[in-house]
Image: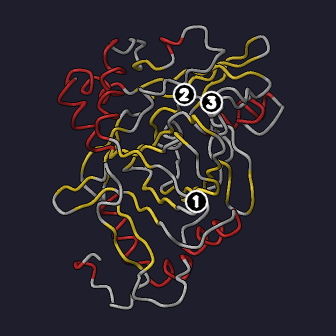
Amino acid sequence: MDTDSNMAEESFFHEVVGLLPQQKSENGVVFPVVLSPNPKIANTVHLTEAIKANKTWLDSLLNRSGAILFRGFPVSSASDFNDVVESSGYEDFGYGVGGSGTRTKVVGRVYTANEAPPDQNIPFHHEMSHAPVYPSKLFFFCEVEPGKGGETCIALSHVIYERMKQKHPKFVEEMEEKGLIYTRVLGEESDPSSPVGRSWKETFMTDNKTIAEERAAKLGMKLEWMEGAVRVIIGPKPGSRYDEVKKHKVWFNNVVGRFEDKLNSDPTKAVMLSDGKPLPADVRDDCSKILDEECVALQWQKGDVLLLDNLAVLHSRRPLTMLPRRVLASFCK
């Protein structure tokens, strides 16, 4: 248990260190923090009650670490997970206009995680970093644990920023000065084979082009209509953001993901500097390598609940080599 937390001895939580092989620790801060039911409590510890009783402490812990994994609690269904999300007291963000991943609402505030085919990798990203408003916190829940593969990988964004600044100082300076522009091409029908396969109708929640343009404009997006599709131009957007709470910059962009949808005939223009200059060829590869070196790969267990600070932590999904796997998600303001 964290001795600095001033938690009462009868606390619902027990902090577990060393459970995850890649778990990191720097200056006494563990990433991610792993909390399990306190073995000193004889009765079943319900996660909803534990969260309500320790809300202030958990907020402080999330602020320090960026990620909390709740493991070993009796959370078995989407409804249970929805109760956990509600118990946090965080306001619902929803997943509406502007999101690129295909998701299905399950119950209450709960959605499926990205429904891209299991054999595909979902690159590291901050949820909706391309939008003017993005969720501040993310919940994930493992309803069905994968047989093999399908890990959710998480990485501290400020670490990635510092390493990229060291590796590519001129690019980072230019990126922060000019900002980034993202280009996507959305079809009229959703493509379930792509991690960013939502159609323009689903993305903007309308089949009316004028309404779609109005909704896109509110998100800082410009639409250029094509035969059977639309080109979406996003930005310029900052490539980094300053975390006011932690007082450091974070790597907040889609340089790695590049929105590689199948309809985009020129993927080199998927992400550019705002003056139209393409990204240096080695930036994406080096960033991917750094992310792989710095990440913690979470092998899901049934009942796991993961809480992330969306500004502090990037996340990704590795390909799944053995079905089934069902991870659900919820988004908070």
Residue, disc 1: 302
Figure check: 1 above or below 94: below
Given residues 57 and 176, the one toward you in this image is 57
For disc 3, the marked residue is: 196
- Count residues near mark 1 (Cα–Cα under 10 Å), then give few for <14, some for 14-19, many for 20+: many
Q: Quadrant of residue 159?
A: top left
Name the residue: 49% across, 23% down.
Answer: 258
- For mark 3, give the secondary structure: loop
Q: Residue at the location (68% across, 61% down)?
A: 109
Q: Quadrant of residue 261?
A: top right
Q: Quadrant of the N terminus?
A: bottom left
**Residue 50 in picture, x, y percent from top left:** 49, 80
Mark 3 and mark 2: span between their CA atoms? Answer: 15 Å
Residue 237, by quadrant, is: top left
Q: Nearer the viewer, mark 1 or mark 2?
A: 1
Q: Assess whether mark 3 and mark 1 are in contact (beta carbons under 8 angstroms).
A: no
- Residue situated in front as seen by the camera: 172 or 83: 83
Q: Which type of secondary structure does the marked residue at label 1 adopt?
A: loop
Q: Which residue is mark 2?
A: 234
- Type of amino acid at the residue the image marks with label 3: Val
N-term-proximal mark, 3 vs 2: 3
Determine whether 258 is above or below 66 in the image: above
